[in-house]
Image: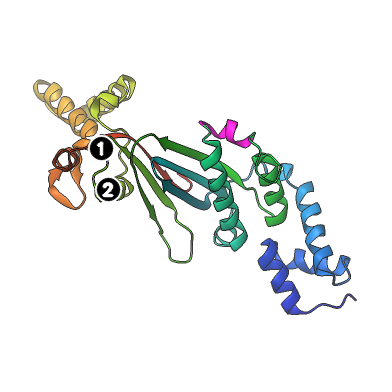
Amino acid sequence: MAAYTAADVKRLREATAAGMLDCKKALDEADGDYDKAIDIIRVKGLKGVTKREGRLTSNGAVVAKVEGNLGVMLELNCETDFVAKGDRFVALADELLKHLQNAQSNSVESFLTTTMPNGNTVQSVIDEANAMLGEKIEVRRIAVLKDSPVGIYLHRTSPDLPPQVGVLVQLVKEAGEVGKDIAQHIAAFAPQFVNREDVPVELIENERRIAHETAIEEGKPEASLMKIVEGRVTGFVKDVSLIEQSFAKDAKKTVKQILDEAGTAVKAFHRFRVGQ
């Protein structure tokens, strides 16, 4: 029997996030040699990458960074919270974010094909992580905002997990803490668009159809239907439009009023929540 201890199994598990039984088998096969066991897990993991393609990745982390007028954000997903809070997964997310700062890709597809400083593509680095961590790992979303001030906010939904919610908000011009305040508001209230003009016509029409059917189901009088439906549609548009929402830190004011008082405006924003 290979000579290794429970501490060796624990060390290997922490390094690879592989299951305890897999770690024991790897150490057995490697005759207790830690480095060889690492390689064995990697090789066996690589063989299973394609088998993991259909698995759900509802855990993970959102990482983001702002330097000057450049803000970048990335959502890295995995299968379990055990892997999500591991040092290797967090380090991978940070490494990919740093590369995104340089690549400034405009889509996940193009980002995956870019070459990292180690000479490997982003996709190959992720494939290696799949093997090492024993789970499906994937970049789900990226965001790049540049050429004007960017506010940032990251939120932890649990103290033992990396941030699960991230927001980047791009302003027309710098306005002190307003960028961070608006980013926090977006994290909490999840608007979908900057203003009502950005809401797609087809989305409004679908909401109007639902409001009409709901009003009929509720038995509202025919004479009042149009007014009721339009009122609900107006409320929907207000709810999904950032600048029309009541500001999180002062409900007596809208987000637009806060921005006007600061002498700035929102150009764009991105909000990521892991798994959503």
251 inside magenta stretch: no
Q: Check contact, mark 1 vs mark 2: CB within 8 A.
A: yes
Q: Quadrant of the C terminus?
A: top left
Is residue 107 rendered to the left or right of residue 127?
left
- Point out residue 151 in the picture as x, y percentages from the top left corner: 33, 46
Q: Residue at x 15, y 51 (%)?
A: 250
What secondary structure predominates along the stretch shown in magenta?
helix
- The residue carrying mark 2 is 185
Residue type, label 1: Leu
Q: Residue at x 78, y 62 (%)?
A: 38
**Disc assigned to residue 55:** none
The segment highlighted magenta reads 106-112
- Point out residue 263 in the picture as x, y percentages from the top left corner: 17, 38
- Point out residue 32 in the picture as x, y percentages from the top left corner: 85, 72
**How far separated are the C-alphas under marks 1 and 2?**
9 Å
Query: Within 10 angstroms of label 1, few (less than 14), some, or many (20 or more) residues?
Result: many
Relative depth, front residue between 96 and 159: 96
- The residue carrying mark 1 is 242
Q: Residue at x 47, y 50 (%)?
A: 62
Query: Residue furthest toward the front?
Result: 68
Image quadrant in which you'd find residue 21: bottom right
Q: With respect to residue 197, does 40 lie above or below?
A: below
Q: Residue at x 32, y 43 (%)?
A: 190
Residue type, label 2: His
Is residue 53 rendered to the left or right of residue 227?
right
Q: With respect to residue 50, does 200 lie above or below?
A: above
Secondary structure under the numbered disc 1 in the rendered image: helix
Relative depth, front residue between 104 and 250: 104
